[in-house]
Amino acid sequence: MKSGLWSRGESATDWGGLSARTTGSTALLRLWRGFMTARGFIAAILLVLQVLTYGTNHTTPLAPLALAALYLVMTLAGARYVRFQPPLRALGPVWLVTVGVDLAVFTGLQVLQPGSVSYTPLLALPVLMAAVLGTMPVGLGTTAAAALLLLGEAGTRWLQSIGDPATQFAQAALTGAGLFAVALLAHELALRLAREETLAMRSRSTARMHALVNDLIIETLSEGVLVVDANGRVHAANPAADAILGQGLSSLELPFALDVHPAWRPLGELATQTFALRTAQSREIPIAQPRGAPREVRVRTRLTPSTDARADSLCVMFLQDLRELEARIRTEKLAAMGRMSAAVAHEIRNPLAAITQASALLGEDLVEPGHRKLTAMVQHNAQRLARIVDDVLDVSRARQQRSLPLNEQLALDATVRTVAEEWVRQSRRQGVLLLLDGGGCDVRFDVEHLRRIMVNLLDNAARYAGDREGSIQITTQQGSNGRASLQIWSDGAPLEAAVQRHLFEPFFSSESRSSGLGLFICRELCERHGATIGYERRTLSASGPEGNEFFVTFAPAPARLTQ
């Protein structure tokens, strides 16, 4: 559809152009049906009138009765079979079987029954129909034809010496002028109707698009959204609100009362307070959950502006899980701390290397055991600082390099066996058991990165594991979903709940002499390769002891290309 259709400024005087009308106007189609109904109604009345006239006066000719009956048949057939595509563009077939038939029938009845009944007022029907449903040439042409018919009837009466010819011609001229005025006004009103319809359709389309965009935004918001009326009924809720509130909110049929669950009653009280004070409110409310402890939720309310005096405003409630908010803030702080730590580590590295080298040179010249012990302490602590610096810089490098070439693959079982045997030789740890059942699969992982993860996890396991055979077990498996996994289990004591929550966070450690970056680096390396790392407390067999297990689930490797 052209954007300028039905605009007053475009071809405003060219009533015959296609740009003046919208071919798919539903308003014109409704008017068409209205006119066709009116034609059938008038045809039925004319037929009844002719039947009554003939019944009361048998000397009346049958021609008007036959013409009225034929007109009724033609109007019914036209309403049933004529297909109208607005507007009437020319004096074509559609015009002939509708407006043309009306003009001919009304004129014929007037000619067949001169002086008895005046049918000239019925000429307004075809004139209005052509002016409303047709272009300007069709409307003016129909009105001119009606005016000529009126003048012709006046001329016929003058030739037959019936009445005053001057009065009859003046009456015909005035009636024709009135028909022209009615046609112009009706056409202008039809244009206005079509313009308003076009604007309404455009506005409705825009409103529908805005509604869809708003729904999409609300659906994807991380904040929960509830729309509550003054009676405490919820009219809209997004998935985030269901996740925060729980209690099967998504299964409830809208609208529902906010106090349907006792846990939500504080929300209803806050909404009531918002309506009473007519101001925005903010409060932190504990919301009971089906399982576990209550969830602390920050609730903010806003009232929508009401433009209708008969309708009250709605209260929009924004729900935010404080745990997620605190986690986001903590992540931002840790990111800032990591950037600062990396910058500090770069500055520490050079003087630390100088201290290490100087203590080593000094130790070569010292003879007394006390002095050599002091230099050994300096070297040991300098090396410890160097490891911490390396850990901090490794975190920075892992975050900067987030992708890995697809061709970086390794055989899981063979690599795990090699790394485990190297670690056992270097650590001289006894009781390590290997259970490799990866099925010879390949995984998308860098060899050095996997060695770094395994050494870190094995060092942690050795720190708390016992000395018996099988106190540390290294296992590989091929999952049913096609993803291979690596498990490192040890029979150490269970970790506290507070430790488990922060296990993979940077700078967190239960050991005073640890940097707290080992498991964090393992997680960063796993995420870089599309793998996941986790922890659980489990037993390997029904009769075996419980232990701590760290597991790495690898991303499936793409198929290797064969030559």
Image (cartoon, rainbow, N blue to C red):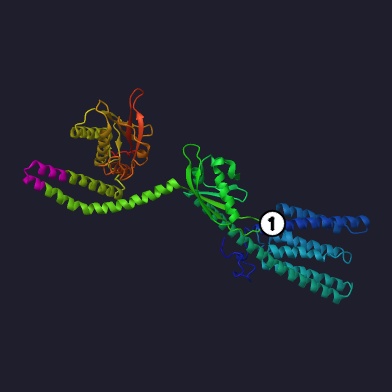
Residue at 10% in and 44% down: 371
Residue 396 located left or right of residue 331? left
498 to 62, vertically: above or below? above
Q: Amino acid at mark 1?
A: Arg
The percent position of residue 392, horizontal first and vertical second, equals: 26, 48
Closer to us: 175 or 215 = 215
User: Considering only vertical position in the picture, is 478 above or below 279?
Assistant: above
From the viewer's perspective, is 457 left or right of 18? Answer: left
Q: Secondary structure at mark 1?
A: helix
Q: Magenta region: which residues?
A: 360-379
- In front of the other: 532 or 426: 426
Among the 4 quarters of the image, the one containing residue 166:
bottom right
Q: Classify residue 115 by image quadrant.
A: bottom right
| Residue pictured at 37% horizontal, 37% vertical | 497
Q: Is residue 496 magenta?
A: no
Q: Residues within 10 Å of mark 1 (few under 14, many from 20)?
A: few
Q: Is residue 370 magenta?
A: yes
Q: How would you classify the magenta stretch by its main secondary structure?
A: helix
Q: Is residue 239 left or right of residue 458?
A: right
- Image quadrant occupied by the C terminus: top left
Q: State the count of labels.
A: 1
Q: Which residue is mark 1?
A: 30
